[in-house]
Image (tube, grey):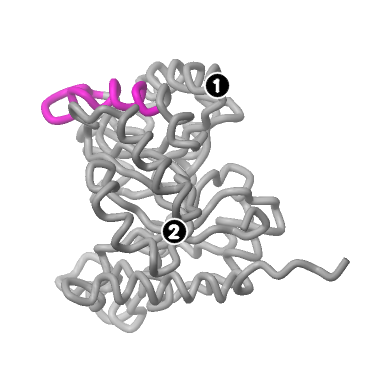
Amino acid sequence: MDNTLRIGTLVGGNDAVKVIPQIVKHGFESFNLTFWQSSGDTDLGELARKVRELADEHDFVISAISVFGNPLTGEGDNADTLSTWERLIDHAHLFGTNLVSGFTGRIPDRPIDESIPRFKEVFGELTKRAADKGVRIAFENCDMGGTWESGDWNIAHNPAAWELMFNAVPEDNIGLEWEPCHQMVSLINPIPQLRKWVSKVFHVHGKDATIAWDIVKEHGIHGNQPFVWHRTPGFGDSNWTDIITILRQHGYQGTIDIEGWHDPVYRGELEMMGQVHALNYLKRCRGGDFVPNPI
């Protein structure tokens, strides 16, 4: 398995011990454990112990542990987000991973460039903390409804922002948790982007998109007609064989973890049907199961 780019899925950190045994039998090879805004009073050491027992039993890896909140403000429900980043960095090795991911945060309702000084302050320190523990930091590229001018969650959704971020904190252990979907929502072609940025891609989320170009051309992007949908891989527009080829050509060592719960068709009762289809589709796109050469 070590020679194969593993395919897995996202699971809520607090649900992992209950959910993983139910779904691992479908063939998931990795899990990205996630927390929303805070890990709360979760005993991360105990969670890691239980998850590692499951990993030993079922031969999967924990690819990353993540917190999605706004660590730059520390306000309201984000009061514990920065501390959660610190705790996840400190506990990552117990899960057997060296990757912690999430949103950058941003100064609410201000242009992206105005968030860069605070970003440099917060993540300058976090990257040092992470480097001391052999941990890498990766930023989800979701806009969370924000634009360049305004937003509440994340600045890392546009390549111009990536330039600002990585110039402000020019460390080797800071990079991207990339997926084509969030770029396609902005009508960016993800393939040339991946070729350009692949050296900064530390983790890949398996989420795709379908763009209705006929609606774009008739109604534009500011009308009352939806023109793009988040999709589970295998149902969207991206050629994942090309994506995996680019990743492998550049020595990518991470996983692809399916981010479900977004597809407009394969949802509700069809959620795991869609995710297992995506799992098998992505395994085909990587070339199937690893086969050793004759000696």
Q: Is residue 198 magenta?
A: no
| Quarter of the view holding residue 90 | top left
Q: Hey, which residue is sitting farthest left in the picture?
A: 76
Q: Is residue 263 visible?
A: yes
Question: Hey, what amino acid is under mark 2?
Answer: Gly
SS for dot 2: strand
User: Going by the image, does 206 lie left or right of 15?
Assistant: right
**In the rendered image, which residue does mark 2 sit on?**
8
Q: Between 71 and 119, which is closer to the camera in this rendering?
A: 71
Label 1 secondary element: helix
| 212 in relation to 105, above or below | below
How crowded pointer 2 is (Cα within 10 Å; few <14, some 14-19, many 20+) is rated as many
Percent of width and height locating residue 147: 29, 47
Q: Amino acid at mark 1?
A: Ala
Instruction: Say which quadrant the C terminus sits in.
Output: bottom right
The numbered disc on residue 116 is none
Q: Quadrant of the N terminus?
A: bottom right
Q: Nearer the viewer, residue 50 or 250?
A: 50
Q: Which residue is mark 1?
A: 131
Residue drawn at (44%, 59%) of the image: 8
Q: Main secondary structure of the magenta part?
A: helix
Q: From the top left corner, tell me how far across and down residue 144 is, in percent.
A: 26, 48
Magenta part of the chain: 73-88
Q: Which residue is pictured at 70% across the width and 70% down the height? A: 291
